[in-house]
Image (cartoon, rainbow, N blue to C red):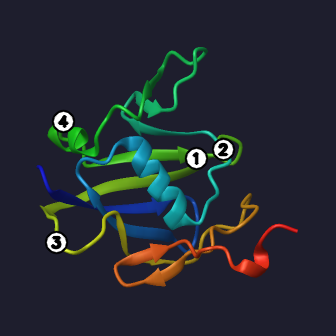
Amino acid sequence: MKDSIIRISITLLDVDPAIWRRIEAPASITLEGLHDVIQIVMGWADYHLHHFQFGDVMYGAPTPEDRDMHDGRKIKLSTALVDGERAFDYVYDYGDNWCCVVVLEAVAPAILGVTYPCLVEGARPRSSRGCRRSLGLWRVPGGYRRPKARASQGTA
């Protein structure tokens, strides 16, 4: 799976109309890296705890008190494919309990000149419930990016 990408759909559950994104990411991305990508494409600010749920097994940022949480920084997305997992949950913000279903749709060779991960498509803006600010992503060929701070927004 070296130099492979995985096409991934991410759908926020219990929201109507649906908020969803389709991304492509390297098969070598870790679950923690996927968390970072989800935060950006959904317009969230990474203020809250999170985990990925594969059946009864949770992956995230373990703490000494939470012995049920496995370290998401050590697991690559390609491992989930090898283990036969095609769909799993991503839970963010335990207070609001935002749950996304993540589906690994396809594996393909990486395209030369394309920077991964990238946003392929999506629908609906981010959920404003509980979001304090937008990450201010700009649409660019092949995905989204964060704008650079303007000089006028510098220090006071």
Of callouts 4 and 3, the N-terminal one: 4
Callout 2: SS: loop
SS for callout 3: loop
Secondary element type, mark 4: loop
> Which residue matches tag 4?
83
Look at 48% across and 78% down and name the residue there. Answer: 123
Query: Residue flagged by tag 2: what amino acid is it?
Result: His
Q: Earlier in the sequence, mark 4 or mark 1?
A: 4
Pointer 2 or 1: first along the chain: 2
Say if 120 sits above or below 64 in the image: below
- Disc 2 vs disc 4: which is toward the camera? 2
Mark closest to the chain's N terminus, 3 or 1: 1
Crowding around mark 3 (Cα neighbors within 10 Å: few <14, some 14 to 19, many 20+) is few
Amino acid identity at mark 3: Ile
Q: Residues within 10 Å of mark 4 (few under 14, many from 20)?
A: few
Q: CA distance from mark 3 to mark 1?
A: 31 Å
For marks 2 and 4, give the CA distance: 28 Å
Residue 17 x/y as whole percent: 55, 75
